[in-house]
Amino acid sequence: MAKQYQALFLLLSVSYLFSAELTTATISPTGTSTKALNFIQSSCKSTTYQSLCVETLSVYANTIKTSPRRLLDAAIAVSLNQALSTKLFISHLRKSPFQTLQDCAPSTDTFNTDCQCSIEELQEVENCNGWTECLSKINNAEVCAIAGESHSVENTCSSPFAGPVKMSVQGRISDAVRKSLQTRFAKLHQEINNAKLLFKAFPNNHK
C-alpha cells in the first residue's frame, strides 16, 4: 500500500511540472528509437555521472527523441522524483518510534529541510526567467542535496546499540537507516548535478 501511495505521489507531483506525455512515457526494449538512445548517450557524456544519466533518462527516450528541451525537462523530472521519494522516506522516520530523533543532531527535521529545499528549487526551474536563473535554481537544489548527504554521516546522539534498524533510547539513528539516507541524498545530488551539466550543455533550450 505504501508503494502505491508513493507512486501516486510522485506521478502527481511530476505531472504538475511537466507534460503528461513526458511523465507517462515508458521505455520498450524493442520500441525505443535507436536515434533517441544515441542522443541521450551522447548528451550524457557532458555529465559527471554518465551511467546514471543514461539509465534514468533512457526511460523517457520515446518522448525525448532528439529534443534538448525535452531532455532537460526529463532531467529535472528525474531529480524531482528522487527528491520526493527521499522526502517520503524521511516522513516515515518522523513517525513513532522514530520521533526520538528530534533529540539528535541532525534530526529528521534537518533532513526534511534539506530535502524540501531541493524540491522547492527544482519546482521553480519550470517558471524561472532566463537560463541564468534556471541554472541558479538547479545549483541551489544541488547545495541542499549535498547538505542532506553531509548530515547523513553526522551523529551527535549517544550510545550505539545492537540491531540493524532499531533506535536506542537516546534516539540514535541505526547504521542501516543512516546509510539509506546517505544513499538517497547521494543519488539526489548526482541526478541534480547531471541536470545542471545538461543545462550547461544546452544553454539555449531551457524554455
Image: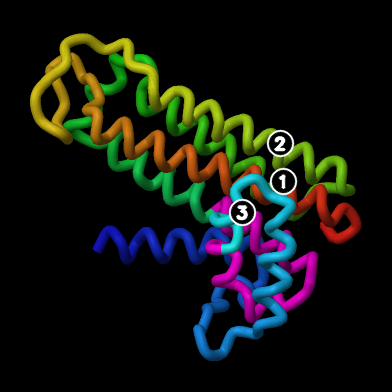
Q: Which residue is mark 1?
A: 196
The residue where tag 3 is placed is 50
Q: Main secondary structure of the magenta part?
A: helix
Label number found at residue 103:
none
Q: Secondary structure at mark 3?
A: helix
Residue 70 colored in magenta in the image:
yes
Discs 3/1, front:
3
Dots 3, 1 in contact, CB < 8 A: no
Q: Residue at x 52, y 31 (%)?
A: 114
Badge 1 element = helix
Range covered by the magenta-colored residues: 55-80
Vertical arrangement, residue 131 with respect to residue 20, above or below? above
The total of numbered circles placed on residues is: 3
The numbered mark, 2 or 1, whose residue comes first in the sequence reads: 2
- Report the front residue among 135 and 13: 135
Structural distance between the alpha carbons of marks 3 and 2:
19 Å
Work out how far the residue at label 3 is from the one at label 1, CA to CA, in angstroms: 13 Å
Query: Which amino acid does the dot numbered 2 rest on?
Result: Asn
Q: State the residue position of label 2.
A: 139
Q: Which residue is depicted at the point 65% across and 75% down?
A: 37
How far apart marks 2 and 1 lie (CA) works out to 7 Å
> Do the residues under discs 3 and 2 have CB atoms within 8 angstroms?
no
Residue at the bottom extreme of this rendering? 30
Type of residue at label 3?
Gln
